[in-house]
């Protein structure tokens, strides 16, 4: 992927017309006077199962964006409705959901999924149906730049796919550089969960860490369903690393970290955004001192996110917006802005080929979002390559360092 400076935007809209009275009912098929057209925005995320903390935050944040758009009358003559489906973090279920949403002519875009492996199963359905698919969380480079991106043969395989999260090429490299230059790690043991996301993240970490002079003390592959890591603990302990890096998600990394420390491996565990969840700390009584990176800056530190945080709280959602709340709001708002452009260009109506025109409009969408300026490059990737390193401190994730990867401070 690219390492470029953040695109300077010449035009912008407000960040989702955020209001503090944001919690409204879901859109009906028609407004009360019958004059409005209903546009459905689909959503695919794991709203049940071990990753549901992240998935529910995604669902709620998308609903908030839609409620705000309807309240503000963001698109004249259009009422938006969210159709949220649970993919259980399973690729086959994600593909079924994509097919179901594509079969509804009122669906003009889909937000999600959470998992890169699920996205791979949805992209072809999206492409075949000219249906915009935009993820707030996917980070595998292959999704936007093709399988040969490592050889710098980058080709966009799915013109209907976009994302507001930067890639593992950026995130994993950031992690490797942060470990070497900020944490002063000399030896790292690298573990991955054999899933698309975990393998890519771990590979990028290894490449950057080694390039800078770090030594890989050992590698191991586990199953994302594993919860007994005795054999791994023994191998890591013998290798005597300064850091253990895990490519995967919090349901496994939480128990892994605790078992490592129980087994005498006292160095921190570090991972990517799949680890950055409050549930990681709940699953791990010895999480203190562990690290995780996540895309963007923490919304709590962004002036652009103040209204989002206040509106989310006022909406009364039971679940936290978690790691991807801000980027989900921005993903949903990007679809809304694309629909707005299509309606304005078609004399206030939706054309028969609205889906195709929405995809075309997505490539030109720019606005000031919750997470900062939103725009997409020629691959459908976000132009925002900001990454933040977090550390568990007193039962909470505390931000330690944020930077665009290309601007990483090498002092």
Image (cartoon, rainbow, N blue to C red):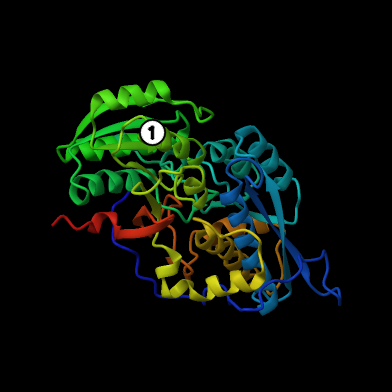
Q: Residue at x 16, y 55 (%)?
A: 410
- Of 40 and 138, which appears nearest the observer? 138
Q: Position of residue 350 (x, y in %)?
A: 71, 65
Q: Residue at x 18, y 49 (%)?
A: 181
Q: Residue at x 59, y 73 (%)?
A: 311
Q: Is there any visible trace of residue 147 in the rendered image?
A: no
Q: Is residue 380 left or right of residue 319?
A: left
| 263 over 13 or under it: above or below | above
Q: Position of residue 28 (x, y in %)?
A: 81, 65
Q: Position of residue 103 (x, y in %)?
A: 75, 45
Q: Which residue is mark 1?
A: 262
Residue 206, located in which quarter of the rendered image? top left
As drawn, the residue found furthest toward the right would be: 33
| 46 over 312 or under it: above or below | above
Q: Residue at x 25, y 36 (%)?
A: 207
- Of 329 and 35, which appears nearest the observer? 329
Residue 331, located in which quarter of the rendered image? bottom right
| 156 over 403 or under it: above or below | above
- Of 220 and 233, which appears nearest the observer? 233
């Amino acid at each position: 992927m690219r390492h470029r400076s953040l695109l300077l935007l010449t035009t912008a809209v407000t960040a989702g017309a955020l209001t503090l009275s944001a919690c409204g009912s879901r859109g009906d098929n028609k407004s009360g006077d019958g004059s409005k057209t209903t546009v459905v925005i689909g959503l695919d995320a794991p709203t049940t199962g071990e990753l549901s903390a992240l998935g529910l935050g995604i669902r709620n944040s998308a609903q908030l964006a839609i409620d705000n758009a309807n309240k503000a009358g963001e698109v004249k003559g259009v009422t938006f409705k969210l159709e949220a489906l649970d993919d259980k973090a399973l690729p086959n279920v994600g593909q079924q959901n994509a097919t179901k949403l594509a079969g509804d002519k009122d669906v003009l875009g889909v937000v999600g999924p959470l998992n890169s492996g699920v996205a791979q199963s949805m992209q072809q359905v999206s492409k075949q149906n000219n249906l915009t698919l935009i993820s707030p969380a996917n980070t595998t480079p292959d999704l936007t730049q093709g399988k040969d991106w490592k050889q710098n043969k980058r080709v966009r395989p799915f013109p209907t796919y976009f994302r507001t999260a930067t890639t593992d090429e950026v995130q994993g490299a950031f992690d490797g550089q942060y470990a070497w230059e900020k944490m002063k790690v000399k030896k790292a043991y690298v573990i991955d969960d054999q899933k698309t996301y975990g393998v890519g993240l771990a590979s990028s970490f290894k490449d950057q860490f080694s390039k800078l002079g770090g030594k890989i003390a050992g590698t191991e592959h586990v199953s994302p369903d594993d919860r007994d890591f005795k054999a791994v603990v023994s191998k890591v302990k013998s290798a005597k690393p300064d850091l253990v890096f895990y490519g995967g998600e919090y349901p496994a990394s939480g128990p892994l970290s605790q078992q490592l420390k129980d087994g005498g491996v006292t160095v921190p565990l570090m991972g990517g955004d799949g680890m950055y969840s409050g549930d990681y700390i709940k699953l791990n009584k010895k999480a203190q001192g562990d690290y995780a990176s996540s895309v963007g800056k923490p919304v709590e530190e962004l002036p652009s996110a103040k209204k989002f945080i206040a509106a989310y709280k006022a909406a009364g959602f039971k679940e936290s917006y978690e790691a991807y709340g801000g980027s989900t709001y921005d993903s949903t708002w990007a679809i809304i802005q694309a629909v707005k452009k299509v309606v304005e260009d078609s004399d206030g109506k939706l054309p028969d080929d609205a889906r195709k025109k929405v995809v075309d409009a997505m490539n030109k969408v720019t606005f000031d979002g919750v997470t900062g300026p939103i725009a997409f490059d020629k691959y459908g990737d976000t132009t925002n390559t900001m990454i933040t390193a977090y550390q568990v401190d007193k039962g909470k994730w505390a931000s330690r360092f944020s930077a665009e990867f290309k601007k990483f401070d090498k002092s």
